Amino acid sequence: MKLLRFGPKGQEKPGILDSDGKVRDLSGKVADFAGAGVSLEALEAIRAIDIASLPVVENPGRIGSCLASVPNFFCVGLNYALHAKESGMDAPTEPVLFSKASSALSGPFDPVVIPRKSVKADWEVELGVVIGKTALYVSEDDALDHVAGYCTINDVSEREFQIEKLGQWIKGKSAPTFGPTGPYLVTADEVGDPQNLRVTLDLNGETVQDSNTSDMIFSVRQIVSYMSQFMQLQPGDIIATGTPSGVGMGMKPQRFLKPGDVMEIEVHGLGRQRQETVAAD
């Protein structure tokens, strides 16, 4: 299934794509896609619905984040070997974990706002993993059984805030609009192997990131299992699994976002995003 949310910001309704690619309105059947609303049980209930009986949304308008909110917005750093190299760091021997503020969650076509005092705003296409079942002390063999689905994420970052200031990376990851997510939450059964997905990002029409999740240092099953040894993952949590090489920080000379830049981001099969950057008020 491809699940989505449509409508003005703060007034989105849940929807689903039918076999013809039309949006069907699920708001009469489910409350929204967040927390328990994307649990494995909730997804099974949606599968039981006769999709053809749902109203067709002729003009869905704005597409919001595929999740209304997230309990936790987790991230994995340096998870592609070439990205670690371009960052001037050794490939990690264990997953590097950090978080984004949940308030960074944003729609896939909404503007990305460059924060005040920002000089090094950067782009990062990533495969997003949405948890559908509580996970604690999960083995790698069982890890994917706890995944509800996958989505495209742009892990927008401010490198000066992230690296050059003291403290944790979360400062450079968490500005409002720094977490465009969607357009679709694609259920795990439809995705198949999450380690064989092309990931791309075009900046102003130029392809700057083009890789495949097969190049991840730590696979989705390894990441979910590893994280569950230290914390309890819960339905609705999202994990951004790392970005490949081609970020602005790794270029020579370095290149960062400025107002008016356009990013087009895609994890193939999960939907394409488009954001234009604007300056903060």
Image (cartoon, rainbow, N blue to C red):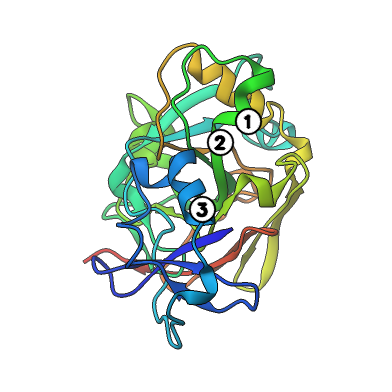
Q: Label 3 sits on what residue type?
A: Asn
Frontmost of labels 2 and 3 is: 2
- Give x and y (percent) for residue 260: 44, 74
Quadrant, the N terminus? bottom right
Q: Is residue 140 above or below residue 48?
A: above
Residue 154 is labelled as 3
- Give x and y (percent) for residue 253: 63, 51
Rendered residue at 34%/31% (across/down):
165
Rendered residue at 48%/22% (across/down):
135
Q: Label 1 sits on what residue type?
A: Leu
Q: Residue furthest bottom?
A: 58
Residue 236 shown left or right of residue 252 in the figure: left
Give the residue number, with chain letter if any, for mark 1. Answer: 144
Quadrant, the C terminus? bottom left
Q: Label 2 sits on what residue type?
A: Val
- How packed mark 2 is, by other alpha carbons closer than 10 Å (few <14, some 14-19, many 20 or more), is many
Q: Is residue 176 above or below residue 16?
A: above
Question: Could you tell me how far apart the alpha carbons at marks 2 and 1 are, in whole angstroms?
Answer: 5 Å
The residue closer to the viewer here, 85 or 109, is 109
Residue 140 shown left or right of residue 146 in the figure: right
Question: Could you tell me how far apart the alpha carbons at marks 2 and 3 are, in whole angstroms?
Answer: 20 Å
Where disc 1 sits, the SS reads: helix
- How packed mark 3 is, by other alpha carbons closer than 10 Å (few <14, some 14-19, many 20 or more), is many
Rendered residue at 66%/18% (across/down):
140
Where disc 2 sits, the SS reads: strand
Q: Of callouts 2 and 3, which one flags the residue occurring earlier in the amino acid sequence? A: 2
- Residue 170 shows in this picture: yes
Give the residue number, with chain letter if any, for mark 2. Answer: 147
The residue closer to the viewer here, 76 or 36, is 36
Q: Is residue 163 above or below residue 228?
A: below
Q: Of callouts 3 and 1, which one flags the residue occurring earlier in the amino acid sequence? A: 1
